[in-house]
Image (cartoon, coloured by chain):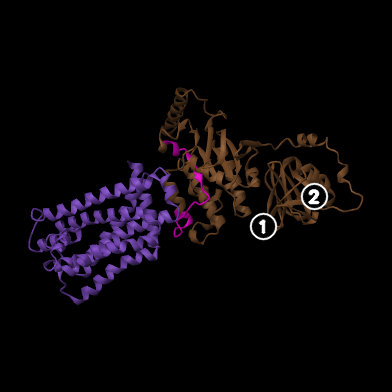
């Protein structure tokens, strides 16, 4: 186990150094921060707008970084040697996931600071954010396994950015088009609903349904990722 | 004290392991690492290579000279990426079909298309390899072995191709597998890198590794080892290196009168499609023999010639040609450098456009020195 953690950390370190020198990827980290700082100057921002920034972060930072990290290993022909090393696939993906996760926490924290966001129940909101981050890491891994280059990764992520960050506002039109109620069950919408409940003074007991729906997304995403991995790694 | 005790117990357990498997004891050179039996590969209508056997023991280097298709197919089969038409491969007595992971654990491959992390420095790579392979090989020593000590803070994207190849090589030292496969180790690299490869191969051999060199270049096959095979659709054939006299004896029966001509006229005929093209001897860079056919190499192009190597040698000696190897005759006027890799491995570098390098066998080195007036 100790060896396994050592290898995981080696991958984390390597990817951290690589990422910090990769302008294309690290630029995406700046986008939500810039947006947060810009909106923060205006003061008194609605929760919906705030959560657009957080959902954008989860998609553009978490999923995209994870996806780009995997895709670039493939593009540069370095994944093969990594797979032939004693590190298991789990260790490789976890090392990368850890880096995406750490970056996400940092960006979310900074965005919240810029937006002056202080939830009434920090623990519940943090738990929901962490759970969402796991979902987006799964999404990034699945997309990373499907793409072949970093360029492809930045294209494939776009539809998901629209659905999972701007898509939160879809439910505004739900009165006109009833089928859009389905959008309420997206993980991003659930995160927002949960935050609204928390602001009304809800605790863990009141938001378990929102957390449950996000958890279902996590399970589904994990299953999809494992399926793609099995299919892709055969050849 | 405690450390000593630990070491002893490790040695004992290894010995027990060998007893269990009824294998030769430690230090026995004949320990088989790679064993290939009846391996063959067909692709649709063509036979890539027909059934062959090959075993490589610890402390042994074997080169396999083949075409590019054969090389990549063999490598893929060895890595379990492509199924063989028939036959089996064992590494350390482990069959690939039993457990791919424990089979692959014993191989490390220097792929021709290996990748690197362009944004990381040389040192980042070395410490990453060291950590990922849980190796205790000191980073400084590997950097010295691959001659990248002075580049340790340079980003890999800024290295030359040759330097990147040497960084690929560094991985092999950390990986510490029993079987090491070099795919075209010295293709397109500079002489320093070639020297590093040859030294590395010897170093790894001394550490008890089995080394397989896959290459399409006879000269690079010969530079590392004397055990060279040719693999093609007819199977695996050893390329003899020491039997230069035998061939000459065999050829002696032929009458030589035809060669002597009344007027001083000497052109070497070659066949190009249906035409016969004549070349002046000074034009020729070198002559290579493969599959019993001699080829003239002129300005990077190769032309098959109707004469045997022995006939060509006797015709061309007056023009300053020299039989530097069983399968090579070189135009000494074109030789720029004689490189000594080790005490008995040499290469001639020509001053033609592609800076061709040609093997020079040990026995011919003395002859050449004599011709050059060096003693």
* Closer to us: A169 or A49: A169
Chain letter of disc 1? B
How many callouts does the rendering have? 2
Question: Where is residue A135 shown, x and y percent of the image?
Answer: 24, 54
Question: Where is residue B240 shown, x and y percent of the image?
Answer: 69, 36
Q: Residue furthest front?
A: B274
Q: Is residue B27 left or right of residue B356?
A: left
Does the magenta-highlighted stretch encompass residue B106?
A: yes
Which quadrant of the figure contains the C terminus of chain B?
top right
State the SS at label 1: loop
Tag of residue B321: 2
Chain letter of disc 2? B
Q: Which residues are magenta?
A: B102-124
Q: From what the image shows, is residue B102 above or below residue B174?
A: above
Question: Where is residue A176 shown, x and y percent of the image?
Answer: 12, 69
Crowding at dot 2, Cα within 10 Å, few <14 / some 14-19 / many 20+, comes out as many
Of the two numbered discs 2 and 1 on the same chain, state the one appearing first in sequence.
2
Q: Is residue B176 visible?
A: no
From the rendered image, report the letter of the chain displayed in purple: A
Tag of residue B354: 1
């Amino acid at each position: 186990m100790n060896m396994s953690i050592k290898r995981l950390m080696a991958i984390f370190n390597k990817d951290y150094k690589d990422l910090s020198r990769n302008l294309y990827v690290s630029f995406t980290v700046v986008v939500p921060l810039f947006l947060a700082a810009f909106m923060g100057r205006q003061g008194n921002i609605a929760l919906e707008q705030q959560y657009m920034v957080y959902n954008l972060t989860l998609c553009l930072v978490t999923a995209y970084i994870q996806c780009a990290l995997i895709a670039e290993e493939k593009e540069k022909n370095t994944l093969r040697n990594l797979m032939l090393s004693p590190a298991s696939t789990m260790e490789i993906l976890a090392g990368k996931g850890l880096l995406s996760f750490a970056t996400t926490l940092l960006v979310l924290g900074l965005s919240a600071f810029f937006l002056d966001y202080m939830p009434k129940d920090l623990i519940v909101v943090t738990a929901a954010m962490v759970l969402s981050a796991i979902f987006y890491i799964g999404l990034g891994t699945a997309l990373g396994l499907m793409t072949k280059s970093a360029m492809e990764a930045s294209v494939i992520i776009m539809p998901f950015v629209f659905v999972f960050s701007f898509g939160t506002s879809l439910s505004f039109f739900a009165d006109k088009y009833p089928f859009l109620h389905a959008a309420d069950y997206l993980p991003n919408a659930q995160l927002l609903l949960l935050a609204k409940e928390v602001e009304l003074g809800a605790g863990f007991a009141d938001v378990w349904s929102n957390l449950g729906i996000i958890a279902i997304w996590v399970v589904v995403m994990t299953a999809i990722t494992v399926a793609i991995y099995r299919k892709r790694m055969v050849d | 004290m405690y450390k000593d005790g630990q070491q002893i117990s490790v040695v004992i357990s290894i010995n027990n392991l060998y007893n269990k498997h009824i294998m030769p004891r430690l230090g026995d050179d004949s320990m088989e690492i790679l064993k290939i039996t009846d391996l063959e590969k067909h692709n649709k209508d063509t036979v890539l290579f027909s059934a062959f056997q090959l075993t490589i023991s610890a402390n042994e280097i074997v080169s396999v000279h083949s075409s590019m298709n054969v090389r990549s197919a063999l490598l893929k089969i060895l890595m379990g990426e492509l199924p063989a038409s028939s036959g089996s491969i064992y590494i350390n007595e482990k069959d690939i079909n039993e457990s791919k992971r424990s089979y692959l654990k014993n191989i490390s491959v220097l792929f021709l298309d290996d990748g690197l992390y362009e944004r990381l420095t040389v040192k980042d790579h070395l410490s990453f390899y060291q950590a990922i392979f849980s190796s205790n090989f000191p980073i400084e020593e590997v950097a010295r072995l691959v001659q990248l000590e002075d580049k340790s803070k340079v980003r890999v994207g800024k290295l030359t191709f040759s330097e990147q190849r040497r960084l690929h090589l560094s991985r092999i030292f950390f990986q510490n597998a029993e079987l090491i496969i070099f795919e075209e180790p010295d293709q397109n690299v500079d002489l320093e890198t070639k020297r590093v490869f040859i030294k590395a191969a010897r170093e790894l051999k001394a550490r008890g590794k089995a080394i397989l060199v896959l290459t399409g270049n006879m000269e690079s096959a010969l530079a590392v080892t004397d055990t060279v095979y040719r693999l093609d659709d007819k199977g695996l054939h050893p390329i003899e290196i020491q039997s230069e006299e035998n061939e000459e004896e065999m050829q002696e029966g032929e009458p030589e009168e035809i060669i002597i001509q009344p007027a001083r006229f000497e052109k070497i005929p070659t066949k190009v499609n249906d035409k016969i093209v004549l070349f002046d001897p000074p034009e020729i860079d070198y002559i290579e023999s493969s599959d019993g056919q001699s080829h003239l190499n002129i300005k990077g192009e190769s032309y098959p010639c109707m004469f045997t190597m022995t006939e060509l040698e006797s015709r061309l000696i007056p023009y300053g040609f020299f039989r530097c190897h069983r399968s090579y005759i070189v135009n000494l006027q074109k030789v720029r450098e004689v490189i000594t890799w080790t005490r008995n491995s040499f290469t001639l570098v020509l001053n033609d456009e592609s800076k061709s390098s040609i093997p020079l066998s040990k026995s011919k080195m003395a002859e050449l020195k004599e011709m050059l007036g060096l003693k």
